Image: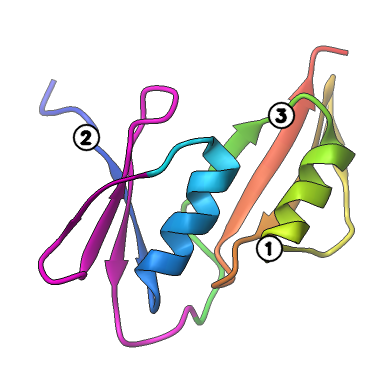
Amino acid sequence: MIGRVSFTTIDATDPDRLAAFWGEVLGTGVAETSDEGRFVFLAEANGHILSFQRVPEPKSAKNRVHLDIRVEELQEATDAVLALGGSWDENERTLDDARWRTLNDPEGNEFDIFVSGG
């Protein structure tokens, strides 16, 4: 083994806003802000830490990496994300016993919410 993933960093023009959004989605809060607000770290959620790094440019292309978040009920989770400022293209996909929707956070970063196993 070369190493272990310590946290996942998401570029953001407004890391405080994005950290607040993801904190609500994942049920955690901000643990640390550093480098004069350039980095915002969420408290660990389900064994993982997200960090948000201030960058000057907005997102301009499809993510090459995205988060997959297991939820209890797709519509309820979708409504909650939309209420927090996220968006959804209204497409739902299925594969075997999994159903998922691709949503976007307030800065346009794609992520999936899914249910599986009945």
**Measured from the top left, where is residue 36 in percent x and y?**
13, 71
Q: Which of pointers 2 and 1 lies earlier in the amino acid sequence?
A: 2
117 up-or-down from 15: above or below: above
- The numbered mark at residue 6 is 2
- What range of the chain is rendered magenta? 30-59
The amino acid marked with disc number 3 is: Val
The amino acid marked with disc number 2 is: Ser
The scheme the figure's colours follow is: rainbow
103 up-or-down from 96: above or below: below
Q: Classify the position of the C terminus by image quarter.
A: top right
How far apart, in angstroms, are the residues tagged by discs 2 and 1?
26 Å
- The numbered mark at residue 86 is 1
Frontmost residue, 8 versus 3: 8
In the picture provided, is 60 more to the left or to the right than 77? left
Is there any visible trace of residue 66 in the rendered image? no
- Which element is circle 1 on? loop
The amino acid marked with disc number 1 is: Gly
**Are there few (<14), some (14-19), or many (20+) residues within 10 Å of tag 2?**
few
Circles 1 and 3 in contact, beta carbons < 8 Å:
no
Residue at the image position 54 percent from the left and 72 percent from the top: 107
In the picture provided, is 16 more to the left or to the right than 5? right
Q: Which of pointers 2 and 3 lies earlier in the amino acid sequence?
A: 2
- Which element is circle 2 on? loop
How far apart, in angstroms, are the residues tagged by discs 2 and 3?
23 Å
Is there any visible trace of residue 30 in the rendered image? yes
- The numbered mark at residue 71 is 3
Q: Nearer the viewer, mark 2 or mark 3?
A: 3
